[in-house]
């Protein structure tokens, strides 16, 4: 009697890769609060805390667009996520609004048409492009077929990004102060990757003394990081997460 060979086991999927993008850096300080703190400083500190929180969960791989005070162009940030085949991308920022009384966080996804005037103004401040997202390129097909496939993949990416933004906002509620209608959309350059679900978080308003003070405290930055990490855990634990990259 011939012995039967054991069935080969499929290799387990690696944990999802999250690309963390601390906004600004180097020669680009971002906005500056009344007390003189630079946006680039807060975004890097929270980015490092978020990296630690995600790795501590043992559920994620993590990469970062920068881990120190250096300048990285918007195009390079997008390219890094694409080269790494990231499963999700989060860009960290702080607001600076005309009304210093406004405070709280916002979570953005990409849209050719901004959800509101405030979203459009914030996108301009963060150096958005005037045109919509690029379509992914496909080899071995006609341009017409490639365009159809690209639009289908882009639609899936945008849908996944909206789900991710929803899960992050839900995780923040109750602990992180949010501006009204915290889920918004605009044409942010750094969110233009056509295959990686991407979101941009304005973690608070540096134009507001209270938000600036909060964001300078270690406890609040770690709380912010833990809630963002919680949103990623919910997103990737869904029965059919739309992992269109990686």
Image (cartoon, rainbow, N blue to C red):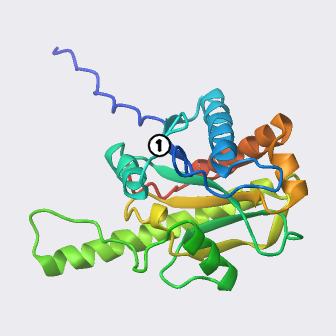
Residue 240 position within the rendered picture, expressed as x and y whole percent measured from the top left: 52, 56
Residue 196 position within the rendered picture, expressed as x and y whole percent measured from the top left: 42, 57
- Please give left or right for residue 187 compared with residue 150 in the image: right
Work out whether 47 lies above or below 211.
above
Residue that mark 1 sits on: 65
Quick one: quadrant of the N terminus? top left
The residue located at (67%, 58%) in the rendering is: 31
- Please give left or right for residue 199 compared with residue 208 in the image: left
Work out whether 190 lies above or below 113.
above
Residue 217 position within the rendered picture, expressed as x and y whole percent measured from the top left: 84, 39
The residue located at (51%, 64%) in the rendering is: 160
Work out whether 106 lies above or below 236.
below
Q: Viewer-proximal residue, 64 or 66?
A: 66
> Which image quadrant for residue 10?
top left
Q: Viewer-proximal residue, 102 or 109?
A: 102
Assign a secondary structure to mark 1: loop
The residue located at (47%, 45%) in the rendering is: 71
The residue located at (9%, 64%) in the rendering is: 140
């Amino acid at each position: 009697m011939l012995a039967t060979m054991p069935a080969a086991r499929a290799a387990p999927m690696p944990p999802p890769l999250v690309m963390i993008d601390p906004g600004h850096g180097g020669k680009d300080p971002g906005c500056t609060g009344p007390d003189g703190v630079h946006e680039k400083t807060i975004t890097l500190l929270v980015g490092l805390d978020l990296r630690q929180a995600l790795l501590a969960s043992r559920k994620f791989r993590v990469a970062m667009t920068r881990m120190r005070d250096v300048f990285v162009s918007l195009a390079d940030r997008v390219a890094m996520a694409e080269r790494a085949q990231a499963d999700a991308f989060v860009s960290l920022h702080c607001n600076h609004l005309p009304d210093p009384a406004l405070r709280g966080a916002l979570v953005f996804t990409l849209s050719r048409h901004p959800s509101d005037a405030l979203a459009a103004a914030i996108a301009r401040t963060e150096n958005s492009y005037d045109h919509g997202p690029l379509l992914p390129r496909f080899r071995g097909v006609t341009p017409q077929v490639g365009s159809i496939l690209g639009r289908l993949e882009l639609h899936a990416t945008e849908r996944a990004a909206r789900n991710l933004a929803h899960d992050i906002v839900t995780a923040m509620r109750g602990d992180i102060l949010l501006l009204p209608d915290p889920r918004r959309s605009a044409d942010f350059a750094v969110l233009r990757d056509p295959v990686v679900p991407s979101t941009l978080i304005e973690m608070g308003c540096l134009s507001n003394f209270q938000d600036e003070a909060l964001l300078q405290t270690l406890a609040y930055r770690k709380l912010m990081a833990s809630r963002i990490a919680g949103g990623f855990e919910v997103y990737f634990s869904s029965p059919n997460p739309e992992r269109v990259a990686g």
